[in-house]
Image (cartoon, rainbow, N blue to C red):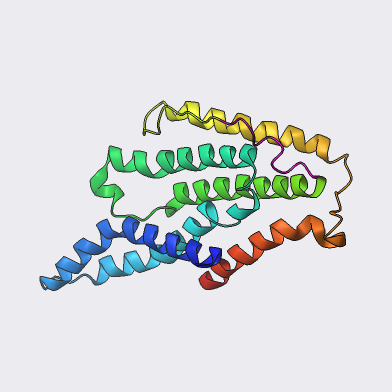
Amino acid sequence: MPPGSSIRFTVRVSIFVLTLPITWPIYWRAVSGEDVTERLHHYNQQYPVTYRSWFESLYKDKYYYMGDADLTSAALLLDVSSYYTGLVRRVYCDPESAFLNLPFTGKGGRFARNVMNFYNRRLVALANRRWATGYYGKRNAGWRELYDGFVPDRRLRKQISHGLRRWLKCELINLTLMLLRPVIRANEGSAGIHTQVSTATASTGAGSSALS
């Protein structure tokens, strides 16, 4: 299965699981003869926002930096912590009302989406710089990632701060890489510095077009 197809499949499965607590009651109410027009209208308004936000925040352009341990670990910590902070904690606190609204909707959802999109764009830019200067994957050896586990309580602060420190460290390394010249691969010509990220673009671009 091509990478772009696998991403679309993963997004659709995860969205199906997320929406099931809302769609299942609507279905049974409709079967029982209840008027679900208002509920269905509310759901249909939220679904496109959630689908696009879910893809853009958690999946888009991940192939740019999945081969670099520094960048991937920062994304893992920030993504999962954001997921638990913005989605899981709300369900734990008030499951009945939380399941009435899809993720990334409302003011809080827009804020979470914008934050996640911002640091994801920065990680992509850092990956491009690392690849262009030959630094991509230089720090991959000897990694051992051990976490306490992600739970929707105050312990999330530890993972968030850990992820922010990783991100900041990558930004500082990027400042030094800005002084280096791009690396040209002997067997790839002048376009060599874009080989890997072009593959990522082709992979994720298919998913983007499917959502337009």
Residue 118 on image: x %, y %: 62, 47
Q: Nearer the viewer, residue 14 or 85?
A: 14
Residue 166 on image: x %, y %: 62, 32
Q: Residue at x 38, y 57 (%)?
A: 14
Q: Residue furthest left?
A: 32
Q: Quadrant of residue 46?
A: bottom left
Q: Quadrant of residue 32?
A: bottom left
Horizontal side of 88 relative to 8 (left or right) equals left
Q: Nearer the viewer, residue 1 or 54?
A: 1
> What is the chief secondary structure element of the magenta stretch?
loop
Q: Residue at x 42, y 38 (%)?
A: 85
Tell whether position 141 is magenta: yes
Q: Quadrant of residue 156?
A: top left
Identify whether 54 is placed above or below 29.
above
Identify whether 191 is placed above or below 119.
below
Identify whether 202 is placed above or below 77.
below
Horizontal side of 114 relative to 122 (left or right) equals left
Q: Residue at x 26, y 63 (%)?
A: 23
Q: Nearer the viewer, residue 180 or 125?
A: 180
For the record, the magenta segment spans 134-143
Residue 171 on image: x %, y %: 72, 36
